[in-house]
Image (cartoon, rainbow, N blue to C red):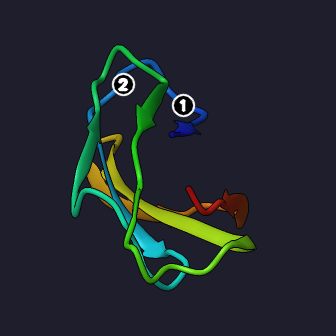
Amino acid sequence: KVKIRLTRAGDDPQPVTLKWTKLPAGVTGDESMMIAADQSELEVELRAAAEAAAVMFEELTVEAASKFQGKDFTASSEPGKLEVKLP
């Protein structure tokens, strides 16, 4: 499982749509995820295929899309780490 946290600005929070932009080979996650307007984090589960290699992946990133002051915007996360372990 991976916990995604975001920092909000302004006084009119909006839902935030997330999508993975970089995952390790053989690892998949939901194509689209949503953080509700009254939340600031989401825990999601990633799935490793049988052929996925055990690795410390240091480039895990997501893209966020939402509205701020009535305007659409997108932002990319800083890279995060994910350890892929074999069963």
- The C terminus appears in which quarter of the rendering? bottom right
Point out residue 4 in the picture as x, y percentages from the top left corner: 54, 40
Point out residue 82 in the picture as x, y percentages from the top left corner: 68, 59
Q: Quadrant of residue 48?
A: bottom left
Q: Residue at x 57, y 67 (%)?
A: 61
Residue underneath mark 2: 13
Query: SS at mark 2?
Result: loop
Q: Is residue 7 above or below residue 17?
A: above
Tell me the number on the disc at residue 68: none
Q: Is residue 8 left or right of residue 33?
A: right
Tell me the number on the disc at residue 8: 1
* Mark 2: few/some/many CA within 10 Å (<14, 14-19, 20+): some
Point out residue 50 in the picture as x, y percentages from the top left corner: 40, 74
Q: Is residue 87 left or right of residue 85?
A: left
Nearest to N terminus: mark 1 or mark 2? 1
* Pick the front one: 85 or 36: 85
Q: Is residue 23 above or below residue 1?
A: below
Q: Quadrant of residue 26?
A: bottom left
**Disc 1 marks which amino acid?**
Arg
Q: Residue at x 40, y 64 (%)?
A: 74
Q: Quadrant of residue 57?
A: bottom right
Query: SS at mark 1?
Result: loop
Point out residue 15 in the picture as x, y percentages from the top left corner: 26, 34
Q: Are marks 1 and 2 in contact (CB under 8 Å)?
A: yes
Q: Residue at x 22, y 63 (%)?
A: 31
CA–CA distance in space, label 1 to label 2? 7 Å
